Image: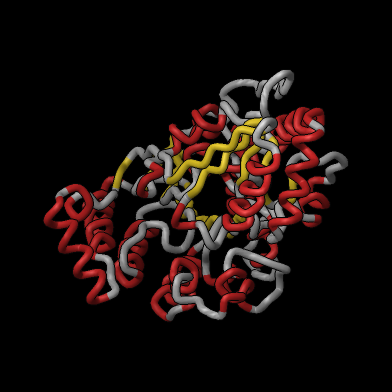
Amino acid sequence: MKVLLVGEYSRLHNSLKQGLEQLGHEVTLVGTGDMFKKFPVDESIRAKWLNDDPFPLLLRKIYLRIFKKDPAQWEIGYRFKKLAPKLKGYDVVQLINSHSIGTYPEFEIKLLKQLFKQNGNVFLMGCGDDYPVVKYYLEGKMRYHMLTPYLESGSTLNADFSLKYMTEPYKKLFDFVYENAEAVIPSDMDYKLPWQEWEKVAELIPNPIILSETFSPIDISNRKVRILFGINTMNYTKKGYRFFDEALDRIEEKYPHLVEIKRTKNLPFQKYVTELAHCDILMDNVYAYDQGYNALEAMARGKVVFTGAEKEFVAHYKLEEPVAINALPDSVKIYEALENLILNPEKIERIGKNAGEFIEKEHDSMKVAKQYLKTWSKVNQL
């Protein structure tokens, strides 16, 4: 099978690509690399003119401030348009979300029309922001979510990253993509729930993780517990990082002889992975029911992760033992959970082992790739 993957914001499509290629399929990944994360792509549509040269970058910032539009989106669209004639003859086209190219919505619709016309079946990932997800959050149907801190503060001025999907241009783009998609494939409980009532939703397929080596069990004998807090500054509010900061400050003050805490900011993925190798506990996300990629990458390495691990997640996977710590938007509860682990390091070792085994069972990229192939093939059998 020949597969085209469009967009990359986490590592989902890179991991799926490897799993599919190991099964003998031909895969092309198109994307921008997602800014500082620098995810690898086969065909890059990253804005170069308006990013790499100081003067055009200055003009971009001025234009953005005055007109509230980013001209880099135009460059991304232009680069995709130049690339589009090469992107033909694929059996499957999968979009990371409805705004997968990353240009202006009206321009994106034109580009997607061409892309869909010259290829086979189209599938949409349910793994991030999109109209149904944001709408579901705003309707208050979940106990908490990434927009919760903005809604609680009474101001959503800094939540444009999500709320743009509720505007008319992005809604029109979503409607076009949804109409042309054969199915929507959710990747975890934070997206399965918002998508569950939509007609084209398929069964949840877990995020694929590349298992390059078997995880090493944690051994905390005669040393301090190492805690990593990898901060993406753009996500500071929506991931509830302030609760982690408050809890870690208390832990650092009370147990300096038992812990080593390292905070990092905006690391490229490869540097982030290096930091993961040296920690025992990772602080990941508060406003989630399930795990995103940073959490899964850490769990694959046998780390204990403070992240989404709500009852819906536990029920879906029929878990009897904890594989992660469910981080609630409460710094006191996070502090107490951390304290419990620090004073009982055998729990860190046990949960870390559970985490590694869980990833091997549910998220191995080859196993997950087979699930995608099954879902894609169902369309041709109807």
Give 362 or 367, whichever is nearer the viewer: 362
What colour scheme governs how the chains and residues are painted in the rendered image of this protein? secondary structure
368 vs 121, left or right, is right
Q: Residue furthest right?
A: 320
Q: Is residue 336 above or below residue 200?
A: above
Q: Residue at x 49, y 57 (%)?
A: 235
Residue 88 visible from this viewpoint: no
Q: Residue at x 56, y 80 (%)?
A: 154
Q: Quadrant of the C terminus?
A: bottom right
Give 217 or 373, whichever is nearer the viewer: 217
275 vs 47, left or right, is right
Q: Is residue 319 above or below residue 348?
A: below
Please state the horizontal and vertical placement of residue 350, each as a whole percent of the image. 80, 30
Q: Residue at x 51, y 31 (%)?
A: 275
Q: Residue furthest top?
A: 222
Please state the horizontal and vertical placement of residue 262, each as a whole percent of the image. 54, 37
Give residue 111's quadrant in the image.
bottom left
Please state the horizontal and vertical placement of residue 60, each as a whole percent of the image. 20, 63
229 vs 307, left or right, is left
Residue 168 visible from this viewpoint: yes
Give 264 or 164, whichever is nearer the viewer: 264
336 vs 63, left or right, is right
